[in-house]
Amino acid sequence: MTSETSRYSKIFSIVKRSLKGEEYDYTSGSIREAIVLLAIPMILELSLESVFAVVDMFFVGKLGENAIATVGLTESVVTIVYSMAIGLSTAATAVVARRIGEKDEKAASHAGMQSIILSVFITILISIAGIVFADEILKLMGASPEVVSEGTPFARVMLGGSVIIVLLFLINGIFRGAGNAAIAMKSLWLASLTNIILCPIFIYGVGSWDGLGLIGAAIATTIGRGIGVLYQCYYLLKGTNNIHIKKEHFTLDFSIMKNLITIAWPATFQFLIASGSWIILAWLVSTTGGTSASAGYQVALRNVVFFILPAWGLSNAAATLVGQNLGANQPERAEKSVLLTAKYNAIFMSGVTLTFLIFASPIISVFTKDPDVHDTGTLALRIIGTGYIFYGIGMVMMQALNGAGDTRTPTIINFVGFWLFQIPFAMLLAKSFDLKETGSFIAIPVAETAIAIAAIYFFKKGNWKKVKV
């Protein structure tokens, strides 16, 4: 067997193991292999999560401008729910990973169940609020009366399913912290496949049934996510290599909940800050450029999310490696893992940048044939894409801090970067310099680059190595 054949055989073996979800000790052995074993299922997991938004936009795009604007504006608000889901998931990942690194699997399972109980209590209230105030939320987002009238049922179903969104993110965070990334990936496969099948059926109908129109997309997405959650719960209760929820774990443990909240609230606020900034930008684009500009921006944003989530998956691998290696009292190995992951992410994101610069027009044309919407979407995709390398590096550094349980530092970075810089800068360009929606587009890569530089600085300081969870 030649050395080249041997190399390809080894790569194939690692890929196969990562997809199968074989048990692996991430606190010893090759760091490169550990990154690949975690990153492949994590990248596929979040790539498939982005499929929800892209599939909805693809099928809904054929329903017209108002439908596109409705999905875009609703998804902008749902990002607040995503922020809470990611915040709670971040806490669960950090605590579970630390316990796994300490070789205390019972404590990891108990912490995971406590995070689920906590999240259900919180998000049921959010779901109820979303159902009741869906129309008012669309109005606040600057939607036209036609969009509010047509889109309220869609928004009501999407926001009402907030508890399902949070559970899907949270439980996958538990599996990621435990190093069981393949189960998290498979739950998204199942959810996404269900959504892809149901979406066109529920929107356009089948046979003599005419379908439900726009609201059908929301129902299909919610059902898909719900099936993914049921799959996750099956494996939690059945038990995996190192996570097994038992009857005793359902007992409320307020000390662990307090610890989770201590990590989760800044993490939640961290992502609320970021998503809130995106909402302001969506409002700014809508008010300065009109419905066509808003629709074009939302189409571009779906593609931005689609390509950025794989990089986020790679960053999640860094978070797991940091948490487990700190639990094993190996901070230097944790740091090396992050730096190597950042290198891989930068390489991947440079390819995305070239893709957006060269193929922005044909990518946008897949989702809309409206000339004005297409032109705005193409411009947005090209401008936002210029900052992708910094997005990738910044993501890894921020997730490394989160994985260590230091959620406060990324929160401060986000607050300064988004609210004290990005929003004022976008307002200045859009209104004072009269660049309209283009000004908002330019502000995104500029702010993200500054945020990445700040994250690198604080990671290099190394205070995260001393955090206790």
Image: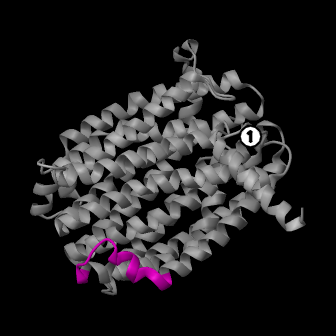
Give the residue at x 78% y 62%. 8
Residue 135 visible from this viewpoint: no
Q: Can you say which quadrant of the picture contains the N terminus? A: bottom right
Give the residue at x 31% y 84%. 375
For label 1, count other residues whose C-alpha is less than 10 Å away and answer few (under 14), some (14-19) or many (20+).
many
* Total numbered circles: 1
Classify 270 as above or below 467: below
Q: Which is more toward the observer, 203 or 443? A: 203
> Residue extending furthest front?
1
Secondary structure at badge 1 equals helix
Q: Which is more toward the observer, 255 or 204? A: 204
> Where is residue 234 drawn, in percent x and y?
50, 27
Classify 361 as above or below 294: below
Task: Write down the quadrant of residue 389 in the picture.
Answer: bottom right
Q: Which is more toward the observer, 281 or 309? A: 309
Q: Which residues are magenta?
A: 357-372
Give the residue at x 51% y 57%. 47
Report the coloring of the rendering.
Answer: one colour
Classify 51 as above or below 354: above
Q: Can you say which quadrant of the picture contains the C terminus? A: top right
* Relative horizontal placement of residue 69, taking residue 332 as reference (left or right): left
Q: Main secondary structure of the magenta part?
A: helix
